[in-house]
Amino acid sequence: MLKISSLKLQLIIFLIIFAAYLSAVNKDATFLFGLLVAVFSALAADFLLMYLKKEKVRFDDSSVISALIIGFILSNLQPWWIFSLTSILAVASKHIIRFNRRHIFNPAGLGIFLAVLLFHGFTKWKGASVWYIMLPFGVYFVYKVQKLEIIIAYLLAFLILFGIKGFGYLNYFFILVMLIEPKTTPIKRKGKIIFGLGTAILLFILTKFNFNFEAEICSLLAMNLFVPLLNRDVS
């Protein structure tokens, strides 16, 4: 049974309330519809894959979080099945692409990347600039998952590389929700710093070369590949 003290449950509650707020403010019911499609698709895919792998079928709050993130990032101006397939791909990647019993890629990030690549989906980050909500709640979650080094390293590198105008480019949802995903980011302090720096540097390079194919998500996924190496001397 999920308890309110569970950090995952707290994140789920925050994302649902935040989504309801944005939907009401922007008078956009399609946002919530996309979220529902993503969540139900993720749960269905998760149950099926657990059954096929002969695991105990259970409610996986991580899949719900990935689906909610997908709902926040994908644009509502596209068919509902894009949300469904993106969630299915995200969940499948968590079960299939693994190393040392851990999934390698940020599930939501990989699902979105594949949806854009394969199905011509497109994104519209909701809540990315709503700093007055994202900052207090985001900092709380960053502190709880012990990923503060990632955020500090990323922000320092980002602002040095992009300059003062970088403040206007900050994607608070990416930084405070996606960048700190516990299972696909380093465990030790040095690894966290390298991860944050590397993500910001890759984003800067892609941006300077006018790489418009989801540069933030691509930078994150690329750094996910190095996590096993960054964790190799962790007992």
Image (cartoon, rainbow, N blue to C red):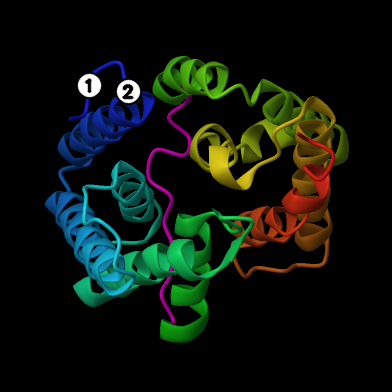
Secondary structure mostly seen in the magenta stretch: loop
Residue span colored magenta: 120-131
Residue contact between numbered discs 1 and 2, judged by CB atoms under 8 Å: yes
Residue at the bottom extreme, as displayed: 118
Q: Is residue 203 above or below residue 136?
A: below
Q: Secondary structure at mark 2?
A: loop
The amino acid at mark 1 is Lys
Write the residue at 62% across / 36% down: 170
Q: Nearer the viewer, residue 67 or 123?
A: 67
The amino acid at mark 2 is Ser
Residue 43 placement: quadrant:
bottom left
Say which mark, if any, is on residue 3.
1
Write the residue at 75% across / 34% down: 154
According to the picture, the residue beneath numbered tag 2 turns out to be 6
Q: Nearer the viewer, residue 185 or 235?
A: 235
Q: Nearer the viewer, residue 80 or 86?
A: 86
Write the residue at 38% across / 51% down: 66
User: Does residue 58 appear to the left or right of 149 in the view shown?
Assistant: left
Residue 139: in sight, yes or no? yes
Picture coordinates of residue 101, whole percent (x, y): 56, 55
Residue 21 placement: quadrant:
top left
Q: CA distance from mark 1 to mark 2?
A: 5 Å
Picture coordinates of residue 213, whole percent (x, y): 62, 70
Q: Nearer the viewer, residue 76 or 36?
A: 36
Q: Residue 163: within the magenta?
A: no
